[in-house]
Image (cartoon, rainbow, N blue to C red):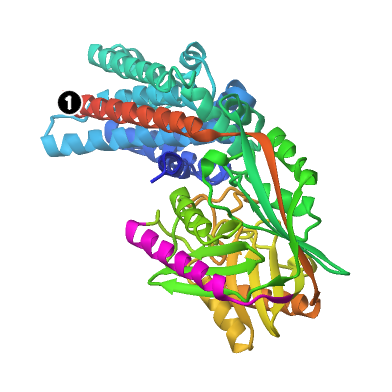
Amino acid sequence: MTESYDDVSKIHKRYSLTLLTPSSKYHSLIFSGIVAAITGYFILTSYLERQDELAFRLPILMGVLLITQKIDARLIRNREYSKALHMSLFGNMSWLAIVLMGMAAFSVLGKPELSLLYVTEGMLIFTSFRIGLLTTTLGLSMRKAWAICFVQPVAMYLVLIPQELWISSLTDPIVMILGATFLAIASIWSYLTDRAGRPEIKSTHELIQAYLASRGRDNYEEVESIIESRSNPSNVLTSQIRFQSNNGDFRMVLPEVHPGPYHPIGGSNITYRIYKTLNSSAMVMHSVSDHALNLPSQDAVNDYLGTFSTNVVLKKGSNCTEPVTVTVNKARVTGMLFDKTAILFLSLSPHGMEDVPSNIKKEIEHLASNRDFERILVVDCHNAMGEEIGQEDSQDMLKAAKATLESLVTKESYPLEFGYANSNGIDVKSIDLGPGGLGVLCLKINGKKFFFGWSDSNNMENGVREHVVNHFAKNGMSLVELCTSDTHFSSIVVRTRTGYYPFGKITTPDTVANWYYTIAKQAEAKLEPTSFEILEHKAEVKVMGTAVLEDFSKALDKSLLLTKGFAIGSFLIFIGSLFL
């Protein structure tokens, strides 16, 4: 396992925590009202036994809730009403939980009366909860958080509790001790988690706030500034196979930079940007690289794209071999030879895997150098969902690659024809597909036609590739391979554990197959004799590197560990209070 993969994996697990937030501010608005009403009902009927006051206290409670939510939105950073609503919902849920647990303790422990202590304690825990949210995700200083943390909980409490009980309930010594304890715990927790990433990460809270701003408001400047400040220049290689004919120019591109880290940050949409730079006549493949080679900012992306005019032509020719495919258990490798440049396509579809690790590429390059290939281009097809590749599958892939290279050496080369078409002329819009759409390359070699499909998507749903291949076969066409770009573009905030939809998750396999078939027929109709060029260029650009990912991962892990510790401690204190 590479270090960057491990760190990205850990960071992505933390991403799933953001799914706890409702998908819409309206959901939070409605649910917070419902939860507050239920809390008020139990307080008035069970704790105070004042059912006759429900009719006027609950409407006032709803009004106070709405007003204080608006006040919160005015006071927090960027005045985001949606975040104020989310905070209100979670805080009210915590209060309701305390009220219900107090009622359960009364019933189970056989207490003589249902004490108002639990209601007051719940309000103070609600207040403490707000300190945590205000300082970590909403961008307030500790001083400002303390200034407004009481506003909503206390206002709601004063509406529900009769005036004659205010002083006695709030000045109870036990209540004051418990309240001071929970408020202190929230403040200390906030202080420590903010410093969890030091010295590398100055403020973990600022990192979290920048991330949330980029996800919720497409405000990418803050998080890009943090990432770029930790990034360093590096030389990255981009290889291309360019096909030219009288009426067409097409490029198969293999950039060393990796798409990411996430939309809309840095090079998350780099595949489409390359595609447009090359006049929408390209397939931008996924190279064997990882998130350490993410471009950290839009400036870095623009610098990188500006180097595409500096290509060096390494080889020219007009002949190539027919594709060779070798399968060893789950591993499948397809190869072609352009003069002495071999290109290999690696896949475990339909079983799937994460990014091909760099050690496999190094082993393949070593195998190629021993067989007198001038260069080797290795494509990670990235066409099925799966975990990190295991040792057994790695060995099978290397065996398949070795057999493919050995077979290519013996193959005869033939004049080449090509035709290319993309989805620009047809409606293929779907949320599991990036803006680059679909493309199909048709190669005619030795009188036979071979098709290669491409999608600007983040991976592909398992089995979709095989469904499309079978569809082509039924129509007498040979689809050699389907590849994805691994774009990290998303037109919406996708609320899944992976953070994206693989191609074929939303679009049905039959629809995908028909789209590819339609485009393939267009590509076939454009077949013309062609020559090829092997192009290469190096660019010095800032990349994220492993240190950024490692530091971010450590900061989040340490913050989560602190959170678990404080949460357990707070829970034990609360459980103890149930016996008072």
Report the magenta residues as a range: 390-415
From the viewer's perspective, tell me whether residue 567 is left or right of residue 335. Answer: left
Q: Position of residue 313 (x, y in %)?
A: 76, 52
Name the image quarter holding residue 577.
Answer: top left
Q: Amino acid at mark 1?
A: Gly
Is 233 magenta? The answer is: no
Reply above or below: 390 against 298: below
The image quarter in which residue 336 lies: bottom right
- Frontmost residue, 500 versus 331: 331
Q: Is residue 406 magenta?
A: yes
In the picture provided, is 182 more to the left or to the right than 62?
A: left
Where residue 92 sits in the image (x, y, percent)? 41, 34
| Residue 507 appearing in the image | no
The residue closer to the viewer here, 187 or 389, is: 389
Q: Nearer the viewer, residue 80 or 289?
A: 289
Count of all numbered marks drawn on residues in the image: 1
> Which residue is situated farthest in the left direction here?
110
The residue at which mark 1 appears reads as: 576
